[in-house]
Amino acid sequence: MGRSDDAKVWARVLSELAQVEVTVQWERPSWRVRWLDGPTRRVVMDRAAALSTYRVAAALPFEQLRFARSDSSLAIALGWLAWGSPESAAAAREAIAEVEAFCAVTGYPQTRFDDRVLGAADLLSRVGHGDASEMGALLTKANPPVTPQAPSIAPGPGLRGAVTSYRWPNGGPPADLLGPTTSRPSPATVNGQQVAVTCQHCGRPLDTDGEGPRRGRPAKYCSGACRTAAHRAHHREPLPAIA
């Protein structure tokens, strides 16, 4: 099999694992792996790297792949609602990077919020014409301001599907690489104290592995931005209609 054939193998395997359409195409100067929303870039890269060690699609090894996850306008709107109303136009421009960062680390964003927030995000996306800057400008003008909407549903599996259609050769990948990841990691223990392993605001994994003694309270958030957003969301108000 050549690289074009193995690109199809990668696309099929990763699409089944992610449960979203994954394409693998030649885009000079590299083979580009693309998908919309779904699992995070790190999750897909890690699984592809693990499968590559078992010579899956050997003519097109992992090292030749470049991964690019895109965000739908609905996912961007959810990122804005997780952030809340900026205080000014200048703050809205600065917040775009934080919204994009939230989207990047939130796998399957549409499954992380309840119907109320999803409905508001759909409205924001349509009124804002799918443009991140315009969405931020709309939230700046919201009256009353939109308070941060923390994900109400715990993070699900890093990959939601399983490979079922591909015929593997003898000695192929083990079953744990061909099915979904665990729904949530087990709590970690630091200095005999059980601590969270995911950010309590965005659900991003916290780096607790291999830590030595640490001072102060165990971390609950992955960044200062999530800490601030979680604090603002403590007394959350209902979402207003977006004019």
Image: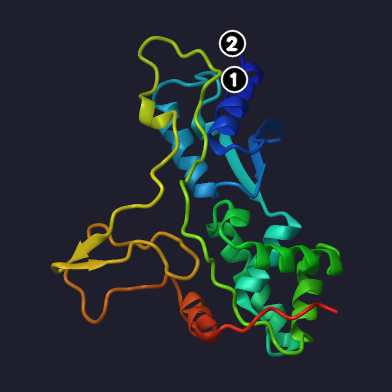
Left or right for 242, reference 76 = right
Q: Residues within 10 Å of mark 2 (few under 14, many from 20)?
A: few
Q: CA distance from mark 1 to mark 2?
A: 7 Å
Q: Nearer the viewer, residue 118 or 102?
A: 118
Q: Quadrant of the C terminus?
A: bottom right
Left or right for 52, reference 88 = left
What residue sits 48% from the left and 84% below the top?
A: 231
Q: Is residue 128 above or below residue 69?
A: below
What residue sits 70% from the left and 87% below the top?
A: 145
Residue marked by disc 2: 1
Check the image and tell me how it is coloured: rainbow
Q: Answer whether labels 1 and 2 touch (C-beta < 8 Å).
A: yes
Q: Residue 142: give x, y in percent of width and height.
A: 77, 85
What residue sits 64% from the left and 22% below the top?
A: 8
Q: Quadrant of residue 92?
A: bottom right
Q: Which mark is residue 6?
A: 1
Q: Residue 101: give x, y in percent of width and height.
A: 58, 65
What residue sits 59% from the left and 74% below the top?
A: 149
Q: Is residue 142 above or below residue 210?
A: below
Q: Residue 85: give x, y in percent of width and height.
A: 68, 82
Q: Residue 17: give x, y in percent of width and height.
A: 53, 34
Q: Residues within 10 Å of mark 1 (few under 14, many from 20)?
A: some
Which badge, 1 or 2, comes first in the chain's sequence? 2
Q: Quadrant of the N terminus?
A: top right
For the question of whether residue 97 can be seen, the reply is no
Element marked by disc 2: loop
Q: Which mark is residue 221?
A: none
For the question of whether residue 110 can be seen, the reply is yes
Q: Quadrant of residue 191?
A: bottom left
Amino acid residing under circle 2? Met
Left or right for 29, reference 217 = right
